[in-house]
Amino acid sequence: MSFDECVYALSNHEICILPTETVYGLACSALSVEAILKVYKLKGRPSTNPLIVHVLDHYSAEEISVTNGFSRKLAYAFWPGPLTLILPKKKCVPSEITAGLNSVAVRSPSHPTFRKILNEVKQPLAAPSANPSNKISPTNCKDAVTAFGMNCPPFLDGGQCEIGIESTVIDLTAHSPSILRIGPISKSAIEEVLGTEIQSKTGQKEKKIDTEKPSVSPGLGLKHYAPSTPLYLYTDIEKMLNSNTLIRDDILILPSPNVMIQSHKKNFTLFYLSSVGNPKEITKNFFRILNEADSLKKERIHASLFPCSDHLLLAVNDRLRRAASKCF
Ligand code: AMP
Ligand code: MG
């Protein structure tokens, strides 16, 4: 669709797929209940799982949420960019978008196309990842379109997403801030800006998800980002390469071609997340590669966790854990 058609659709309670710097979003007016319900329906997303509202800046955030000193500092430091702030909501925000919570998630995206659209439609836009609920997030337009098949809404192609994983989510509704979803903005970078220690409630130890109650944070669902092919996850790469669960024809996802594969193990389909193991490149390629591996419809995909020295790789590890069907 053209830029103008997109603006027209969004202004008229319709939905469309838009690029952001994190992952592609299924966008709609955050003030239109009709449009919000279309997004939930198309994604098959439980109504208990709230959406992120996208705005141009902290001034626009003030129109829909009760901002505070923390939000001002964080917006100044990281917006536009991949940081979502949870703040008390204002009345104009429909409860359908917040899963009935009194808080709303707000973010200012940096993708130029998304910003141009926000400028034109002059209203906040919800934009959860453009994929059926719990499936792999799309980081290019083709993956988003394929994910919805025949039901695909109109889309704007903005190329490959620069970051490739979802925003960091921080809750600013309580006395002390806490991280709900780890992502591209690190805990230490946030602590430096706020000048205070923050907690992490990223839910990795949660055993089950209660779909009856609004989730503290949808990204906390233990099962998320999952390919259709079973994903076997190992604590480190050596464990993966030496595992007797590997069977001829399986798919192996590796950090880079620098990993030595023994000759008798060459009957695998290999995918590399980067050329030399650079964390930014790995993060940018992660969902695209997982999608590509999944599309081969083989029996198993194997991947391993990254040594946790880098905050981006920590965030990729978080997605890997939630995508895995078996951990070794
Ligand atoms: P996604 O749309 O898939 O990127 O996921 C949405 C993210 O929004 C989740 O990870 C949540 O952390 C967050 N979220 C949205 N609204 C709220 C809210 N009111 N309270 C807490 N988290 C929220
Ligand atoms: Mg999502």
Image: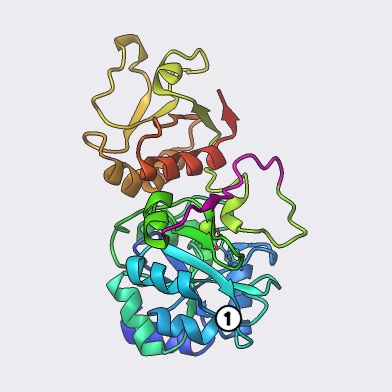
264 or 220, nearer to the observer: 220
Report the quarter where the C terminus lies. Answer: top right
Write the residue at 62% across / 83% down.
34
Q: Position of residue 149 (x, y in %)?
A: 50, 60
Our reading of the magenta stretch's main secondary structure is loop
Question: Residue lying farthest top?
Answer: 264
Q: Is residue 198 magenta?
A: yes
Query: Which residue is disc 1 drawn over?
Result: 35
Determine which quarter of the picture holds residue 146. Answer: bottom left
In the image, residue 241 lies at what x, y percent? 41, 17
Q: Residue furthest right?
A: 212
In the rendered view, would you say 121 is above or below 239? Answer: below
Counting from the top left corner in percent of width and height, residue 276 is at 22, 34
> Residue 153: in sight, yes or no?
no
Tag 1: residue type? Answer: Ala
Q: Residues within 10 Å of mark 1 (few under 14, many from 20)?
A: many
Q: Is residue 266 left or right of residue 222?
A: left
Please tell me which residue is depicted at 28% across the width and 46% down the height of the picture. 280
Q: Nearer the viewer, residue 146 or 207?
A: 207
Q: Residue at x 53, y 38 (%)?
A: 321
Quadrant of the drawing holding the N terminus = bottom left
What segment carries the magenta color?
195-208
Identify the coloring.
rainbow
Callout 1 secondary element:
helix
Image location of residue 300, percent across then percent down: 51, 29
In the rendered view, would you say 174 is above or below 11? above
**Frontmost residue, 38 versus 284:** 284
Residue at point 30% right, 67% down? 158
Residue 328 magenta? no
* Residue 271 seen in the figure: yes
Quadrant location of residue 18? bottom left
> Under 8 Å from ligand 1: the CB of mark 1?
no
